[in-house]
Amino acid sequence: MLLTPSDLQAIGLTLQVATLTTLILLVLGVPLAWWLARSTSAWSRAVGALVSMPLVLPPSVLGFYLLVAMGPN
């Protein structure tokens, strides 16, 4: 047998998490994208830069920034 019951359970959990994540990000992302496309305020430029950071910076750099920003001092 290629797939054991625990394999099928892991696949099912993965599909559930992926579906839930997709729905949440659709609810949050579509209105944000609409606002960013139509707004000309300074806030939209700042939010646009913040949203595009994961595309520009590797995860290790973002992790370092989080450590620096939220560190004890």
Image: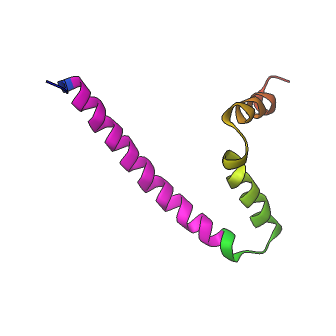
Q: Is residue 39 above or below residue 4?
A: below
Place of residue 57 in the rendered image (x, y in percent of width and height, measured from the top left): 73, 42
SS majority, magenta: helix
Q: Position of residue 41 (x, y in %)?
A: 80, 71
Q: Residue at x 65, y 71 (%)?
A: 35
User: In screen coordinates, is 30 left or right of 37?
Assistant: left
Which residue is found at the position 23% from the left and 24% from the top? 6
Q: Is 10 on the left-hand or right-hand side of 3?
A: right
Q: Is 21 or 8 nearer to us in this picture?
A: 8
Q: Which residues are magenta?
A: 6-35
Q: How is the image coloured?
A: rainbow
In which quarter of the view is residue 12 placed? top left
Give the quarter of the image for residue 18. Answer: top left
Q: Would residue 25 be found to the left or right of residue 2 on screen?
A: right
- Residue occupying the point 81% across, 29% down: 68
**Residue 33 relative to residue 49: left or right:** left
Q: In front: 45, or 5?
A: 5
Q: Quadrant of the N terminus?
A: top left
Residue furthest to the right in view is: 73
- List the single residue furthest toward the front: 2
Q: Residue 62: x percent and y percent?
A: 72, 36
Q: Is residue 12 above or below residue 53?
A: above
The number of numbered discs placed on residues in the rendered structure image is 0
The question of residue 68 being in magenta is answered with: no
